[in-house]
């Protein structure tokens, strides 16, 4: 496919064909690496790590909790209660 670099907002960019993005499993906000290689611009999607809830919960320990209590009065009709997992 041949396309042109055009202005997208304040930055130059090129449109990518939807079929190609679907085939490569690339969507909006997919992180990509951009590099120059041999006179070419190379775009490589970076897979985001997938974690299960159980895997994430094993990483919670008392020493890495950042908010143990919230000082001050409750606001509104709801009360914030901090508890343990």
Image: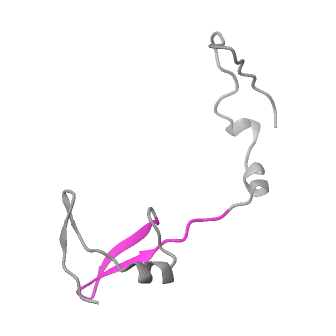
Q: Residue at x 75, y 25 (%)?
A: 82
Q: Quadrant of residue 47?
A: bottom right
Residue 4 position within the rendered picture, expressed as x and y whole percent measured from the top left: 19, 79
Front-most of 80 and 60? Answer: 80
- In this rendering, would 77 be left or right of 54? left
> How many numbered markers are drawn?
0
What percent of the width, then of the height, locates residue 14? 26, 74
Q: Is residue 22 above or below residue 59?
A: below
Q: Position of residue 35 (x, y in %)?
A: 32, 76
Asked whether residue 33 is drawn in magenta, I would say: yes
Q: Residue at x 23, y 86 (%)?
A: 39
Residue at coordinates 46% horizontally, 74% vertically from top-left?
Answer: 45
29 sits left or right of 70 in the view: left
Which residue appears at 70% of the width and 26% of the height? 68
Residue 6 position (above or below residue 22): above
Asked if residue 78 lies left or right of residue 46, the reply is right
Range covered by the magenta-colored residues: 30-50
Residue 43 image-quadrant placement: bottom left
- Tell me the quadrant of the picture where the C terminus can be found: top right
For the residue pair 18 and 31, the one nearer the viewer reads as 18
Name the image quarter holding the N terminus: bottom left
């Amino acid at each position: 496919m041949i396309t042109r670099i055009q202005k997208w907002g304040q930055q130059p960019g090129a449109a990518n064909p939807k079929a190609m993005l679907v085939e490569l499993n690339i969507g909006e906000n997919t992180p990509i690496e951009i590099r120059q290689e041999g006179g070419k611009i190379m775009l490589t999607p970076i897979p985001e790590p997938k974690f299960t809830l159980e895997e994430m919960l094993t990483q919670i320990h008392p020493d890495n909790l950042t908010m143990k209590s919230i000082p001050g009065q409750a606001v509104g009709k709801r009360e914030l209660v901090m508890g343990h997992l």
